[in-house]
Image (cartoon, coloured by chain):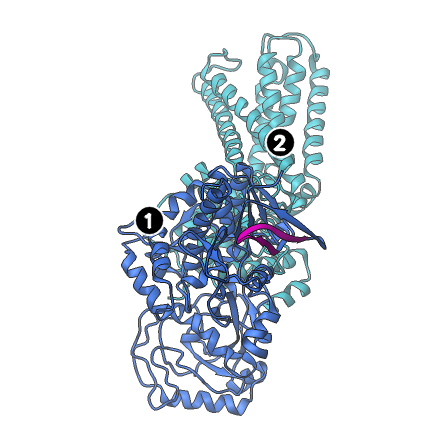
Chain colours: A blue, B cyan
Amino acid sequence: MNPQVIVAGGGNAALCAAITAREAGASVLMLEASPKAWRGGNSQHTRNCRCAHDAPEDVLTEAYPEAEYWEDLQRVTAGRTNEALARMTLRESMRLRPWMRKHGVVFQPSLGGTLHLSRTNAFFLGGGKALVNAYYRSAAALGIEVRYDTEAIDVEMSGGRFDAVVVRSQGKTERLPAKAFVAAAGGFESNLDWLRDAWGPRADNFVVRGTAFNKGVLLKAMLDRGIKSIGDPIQGHAVAVDGRSPKYDGGIVTRLDSVPLGIVVNQEAKRFYDEGEDFWPKRYAVWGRFVANQPGQVAYSIIDAKPAGRFMPPVFTGQKADTIEALAVKLGLDPAGLVRTVAEFNAAVRPGTFDHTRLDDCRTEGLTPPKTHWAQRIDTPPFVGYPLRPGITFTYLGLEVDSAAHVFDAEGRAIPNLFCAGEMMAGNVLGQGYLAGIGMTIGSVFGRIAGASAAQAAKGTA
Amino acid sequence: MTSVEALVASAATEAERLNAEGARIMQICNACRYCEGYCAVFPAMERRLEFDAASLAYLSNLCHHCGACFYACQYAPPHEFAVNVPRVFAQIRRQTYEDYAWPRAFAAAYRSNGTVVALSLAAGLALFLALAVAVGGGLTGARAGSFYAVFPHGLMVAIFGASFLFAIVAMAIGALRFRAVINRGQIPRSADKNDRDRSAIVAAMTLENLKGGGEGCYVRAGFDHPPERLRRTFHHFTVYGFLLCFASTTLATVYHYAFNTPAPYAFTHPVVLLGTLGGIGLVIGPAGLLWLKRRHDSVVLDESQAAMDSGFTWLLLATSVTGLALLALRDTSAMPLLLAIHLGVVLALFITLPYGKFVHGIYRYLALSHSQREKPGTAVASE
């Protein structure tokens, strides 16, 4: 028997949609492109969701009113957001956690080293993979069928309605009809060809921080069918990560927090941006772009012995040397050039009281670009260097939706039984920039909305 | 990590290989920290930047092997980082049991084939005792529950006292060795007792670190089974059963010497009540743990430890079953034979205590106590 609702995807948004649709009485089939061991898409690498709240609530401290959340979002997106959808998402974020708990998600206070998020972000015990496991157990208990290794590659439409989804599984194509469909299959960040189309040859040096399965095949097919798009293909969440990261699925550990405590040079051993502009958690997302714009898309964070223990321990051991020349050799940089850059930097450092916990008064003078905080002379061996590369987390180009998660056809009409959630529509809220934990909030809110809408459409009451 | 990987490849001995692998995994975990809420291991890890043999001995013995961190791990196989904390910690723990045991050679022999060694030792001792009884006055014939007519009290005290004393000395030496190693840790210890939010004893007796942060303990293979509380429950039956049996024996000693009232005691006597309750616990607990072990997901297990684990658990089960049988049939002609078997099993249990799974309780308690004393708030963080 055909399922009433088919959900393409296997991450947080897909699971929220499938569970919600099933609980509304629809029979549900989920299509996860990955094998079971890799299920969950980028959700396996997440760790929290950003939730508004008016008073301290369970794991969240103080208050994070919707108005403040909205201001934060406006700031990071520079206004590139759909206000109605964004405000609805932020409002709904207040109601998420009881639902998540009911379906097996356990929360914990913010992790060590993330105290700055204790007010705004609810952390999942064990991280996103534990959340994904809990949702899959919930889904199984509800009788939701899940097909792994099954990729949705196209949708069939007629008379302005969705008819069937075309899937590819073990080399075979198959047509699966359903009464309603939710597209929640992620962005295109693991599709290297598409990244190259958007970014040019620079993309070859990007690391994909998340799943290898977000190829954007369904997104592309839907766009080709004239379904209305939103967002810019070069916008997305990209951070500076350790250059030695695996090509895919490096996740959280590949971030490098040494940047504000030293200097960063490019392949030519030259500095190119103020490393001490702001706290690293607020800056690391933009550094992905800075590094992407350097020759070879590579940069090197260089510190001396002083900052040891003042930043999150990196997953890869840095290159160590007792002189700047020797470090340059190990990093493959021009020794004379690096010595000159460090000497110029050291000469420009003004006396100050170093305090890595606040925006201190240690800065350079007469240096371009300047370092405006935490500037200390690099003079105490051993010197340590870490390579940096752009790491792409997810892309924002997606499908435009309305508040019921409908997508639109080429004429701008909402398709009554075709819905979208998660990364595939995050661009409605995030035109650019990022707020830690908002991806999971968008996925959860729109996943639930899409699931409810799909169940309603399937039962013919839409 | 490239240097750590090189270390893994070049490690000469099994112990070095395990420690190199443990350090490799901890370096990944310390950069991730998603599992911080599961148990005491991860906060202790966050207080460190480097993972030498001493740190790994400490952290691995702090691990209660609930499995939660493995199933939650974004870096577990098939990920190329191949992170599997429960398994590498089980392997390192087994190595510490062996390294700190006294004398070491006994531990190595026991590790290689624990179940067989334990059970054949029990059988051998029971046979020897049965023969002694047979030679001394016959294996059959009711003696109205008079154990000391079969084995003179003085002889029992001498044999069991000596073997128990040996076990205590051997385990104390192991514990001192282990404590000396973990005290070499890099973390400043708190002088203020108020820093300990809960005592190590409470943590040990409630097994709060086996709760998987409240979710429960992962026992069954795969990701589809919800975490459960059964393992903790069976372990409680085992520990409290063991303690009740111990209390019963201690009380019996008091009655014997202080009140001059030797065994046997009536079924309603406190000594027998404690022993019966403890015995029942020691049937349910070990039987449950052995049953769970069969279902346990092999991916998080240290296969080479299975024999050692099971040897101890089987001996506990044999102790309680033979003890309860002896109690039930003490007035029948089967008593002398049952007594010989029970004493043989208990003797084997005592002798193998320092070399088997029992020592996990000692090392884990010392690790818990150490973690309570480490200064909180020394975690290395980005801000």
Residue B346 showing in the rendered view: yes
Residue shown at 70% from the left, 27% from the top: B123
Name the secondary structure under disc 1. Answer: helix
Mark found first going from the N terminus, 2 or 1? 1
- Which stretch did the figure color magenta? A154-168
Residue B164 image offset from top left, x and y in percent: 56, 33
Residue A92 image offset from top left, x and y in percent: 36, 51
Disc 2 marks which amino acid?
A: Trp
Q: Nearer the viewer, residue B192 or A39?
A: A39
Question: The residue marked by circle 1 belongs to what chain?
Answer: B
Question: The residue marked by circle 2 belongs to what chain?
Answer: B
Crowd class of label 1 (few under 14; some 14 to 19; many from 20; radius 10 Å):
few
Magenta includes A159? yes
Residue at image mark 1: B193
Of badges 2 and 1, the one in the foreground is 2
Q: Is residue B87 above or below residue B276?
A: below
Image quarter where the C terminus of chain B lies is bottom left
Residue B291's label in the rendered image is 2
Residue B200 showing in the rendered view: no
Residue A16's label in the rendered image is none
Image quarter where the N terminus of chain B lies is bottom right
